[in-house]
Image (cartoon, rainbow, N blue to C red):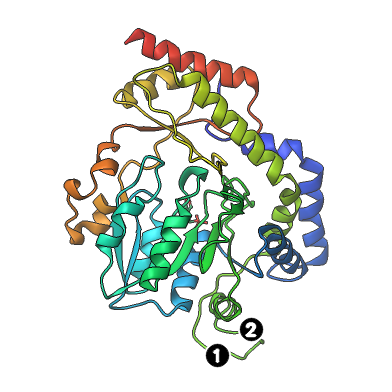
Amino acid sequence: MRIPLVDLKAQYQSIKSELDDAVMSVISKTAFVRGPFVIDFEREFSDISGVKNCISCGNGTDAIYAVLRSLGIGQGDEVITVANSWISTSETIGQTGALPVFVDIDDHFTIDVNKIEEKITPNTKAIIPVHLYGQSCDMDAIMRICNQHDLFCIEDCAQAHFATYKTNMVGTFGHAATFSFYPGKNLGAYGDAGAVITNNDNLARQVRLFVNHGSIKKHDHEIEGVNSRLDGIQAAVLLAKLPHIHEWNTSRNRIGLSYNERLSEIEELVTPVIRPDNFHVFHVYCVMTNHRNELMEFLSEKGISTAIHYPTPLPFLQAYAYQDNQAADFPRVHANISRLLSLPIYPEMTEEMIDYIVASTTEFFCSI
Ligand SMILES: Cc1ncc(COP(=O)(O)O)c(C=O)c1O
């Protein structure tokens, strides 16, 4: 059996006619950049999120950058974020001229809230928590810290569309939240796409200006911005997929919990720890083992694709060598460098596939 890490073709086949019609209707209406599909998507996404404003943009990286710039963050400022994420979370901070300040992770692969306050200085302006792998951060603690220290909170929801923390959806706690709709994401477009959501109307207006050359009204450029707009085809694809996202997330959650239960017997494997009262949408199913490379090779020989999210934690990337970050300051994330492994997870996986992955993983640990 061959099992990919994600299978976008399987998802396409499951709603093929809806997607084909959606794309063709954009072409027949020549609504290629912004236009009615984009307006509809923004309305539906903000309605489902229960947030007043949704501003679409070109990708999830630009979404973070647009919020940071719109909050006035720049040279001389510091922004705190987590040591384990995709580089978009920190490179956007650096691109504003501010300093990205990293915090180690907790047991849930999310920012360790007990280590945030020691990193706050008079220059700190914001915290960007990342709901990594599909699980919410400890938002009560993060919002308490933000309120106490008068900091902005920008939730990076790129991997956690419609995950919940207690009774609320991620993206509804902070001053703003950013999403990526990169094709492999839980809600994925057929190209790059992103969005910002916020209840703050002034911030929403600033972001809307920023992502469209500083203009809301044509030829009236209030500020210098960037060209980062959602195109009609991506909006139509996202609109076609939105009615299915809850069902897809439910499948991911079921598969993740099933893996957790069935792999829990293996002593040398650490399965994801799920926060109580939290709906984990398992964008990634990440385990830890001291035998990572051997397991990866063994599964590959069995036809099972795996990946590492991420091979080098942000503080130790060449891009941040200037910070001279030390392993001792990031003990958890550093200890995981050679231990993380992501197993296949996507809504269309069959029970047979899950059985095969569990059996192959178990076989590996019995053989060592
Ligand atoms: C945590 C996180 N933040 C931000 C991004 C950036 O999204 P995009 O690729 O749409 O720019 C990603 C994408 O992989 C991500 O995983």
- For the residue carrying disc 2, how many other residues have a C-alpha within 10 Å: few (<14), some (14-19), or many (20+)? some
Q: CA distance from mark 2 to mark 1?
A: 8 Å
Instruction: Look at the numbered discs 2 and 1 and tell me whether their residues touch, using CB distance below 8 Å.
Output: yes
Judged left or right of residue 236, residue 179 is left
Q: Is residue 92 visible?
A: no
Give the amino acid type for the residue marked by disc 2 in the picture.
Ile
- Residue 28: mark: none
**Which element carries disc 1, helix, strand or loop?**
loop
Which is nearer the eye, 365 or 312?
A: 365
Q: Nearer the viewer, residue 362 or 319?
A: 362
Q: Residue at x 50, y 38 (%)?
A: 284
- Report the side of 195 relative to 14 (left or right): left
In what quadrant of the picture does the N terminus appear?
top right
Residue 61 point in image, percent of width and height: 48, 61
Residue depicted at 19% across the width and 54% down the height: 325
Q: Position of residue 117 (x, y in %)?
A: 29, 61
Would residue 27 be seen by someone viewing this image from the given angle? yes
Of residue 154 and residue 58, the one placed in the foreground of this image is: 154
Q: What residue occupies the far top of the structure in this picture? A: 367
Position in image of residue 290 (x %, y %): 29, 25
The amino acid on which the numbered mark 1 sits, given as a three-letter code, is: Glu
Q: Which element is circle 2 on?
A: loop
Residue occupied by mark 2: 216
Say which residue appears at 24% left-offset and 54% top-offset.
Answer: 318
The quadrant of the picture occupied by the C terminus is top left
Instruction: Give the residue number, with chain letter if any, for mark 1.
Output: 222
Report the number of numbered marks.
2
Residue 126 vertical position relative to residue 12 in the rendered view, above or below: below
- Tell me if mark 1 has few (under 14), some (14-19) or many (20+) residues whose alpha carbon lies within 10 angstroms of its own: some
